[in-house]
Amino acid sequence: MKGGPTVTYGKGLGQFASLIGINPKVGTSLGLLALNSFLLTSLDTATRLARYQFQEFFDMKVNRYVATAVGVVFALALLYYKTGGVPAWKLIWPVFGASNQLVAALALLALAVWVKLGLKKNNAFAMYPFFFMIATTMAALLFLIKANIKNPLLSGISILLIILAVMLVKEAKDALSGHGPSANESGAAE
């Protein structure tokens, strides 16, 4: 279709807007504005989070400009690097769903640690869904590795996600059992 998915979305929203009495051209413009705003804020958020993660990985010893540049360079590499004529981002796209759910599982874990250590309350309401989500996500990543063993980029990212998730789960377990740095910091704050 002429204009691609962005224009299709805008025109679809314009047609929907006409059903509720809004001029289709105005609806199309508003739809395109909303979509572009979403894309730009998502790009900003992704760049910012990449910077934070990079800085945190190196104990905040890297300044924000260098960390941002590293994140942008990695993103550009995914965009321009091709393997067999296929852009790298297309090769790793299948891991997006699992990585997205892994973030949700780890957010539940962080919430559970905070509820237990910070609020001194029962955290079972967060731990039960966490266990389900982490098991499901890890299984999905293992299936991705098995199905894409000949795609070293996808397999490598999947393996890296598993390793990082296991590290975070271990750190949370240590904190909850009173052996980790989070538990010591929590105790020192009281």
Image (spheres, rainbow, N blue to C red):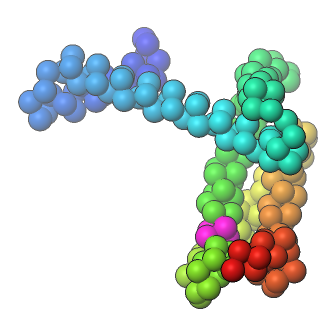
Residue 19 visible, this angle? yes
> Residue at left 80%, top 64%?
168
In the rendering, at what x and y percent does residue 24 appear?
Answer: 19, 21
Of all residues, the one furthest to the top in this rendering is: 2
Write down the region rendered in magenta. 108-112
> Residue at left 77%, top 76%?
188
Residue 142 visible, this angle? no
Number of numbered discs visible in the structure rendering: 0
Residue 69's quadrant in the figure?
top right
> Residue at left 67%, top 70%?
109
In the rendering, at what x and y percent does residue 88 appear?
Answer: 78, 28
Is the magenta region chiefly helix, strand or loop? helix
In the rendering, at what x and y percent does residue 136 appear?
Answer: 69, 67
In the rendering, at what x and y percent does residue 26 appear?
Answer: 21, 20
Above or below: residue 151 compared with residue 188: above
Asked if residue 87 is among those painted magenta in the image, a careful observer would answer no
Residue 50's quadrant in the figure?
top right
Nearer to me, 142 or 37: 37
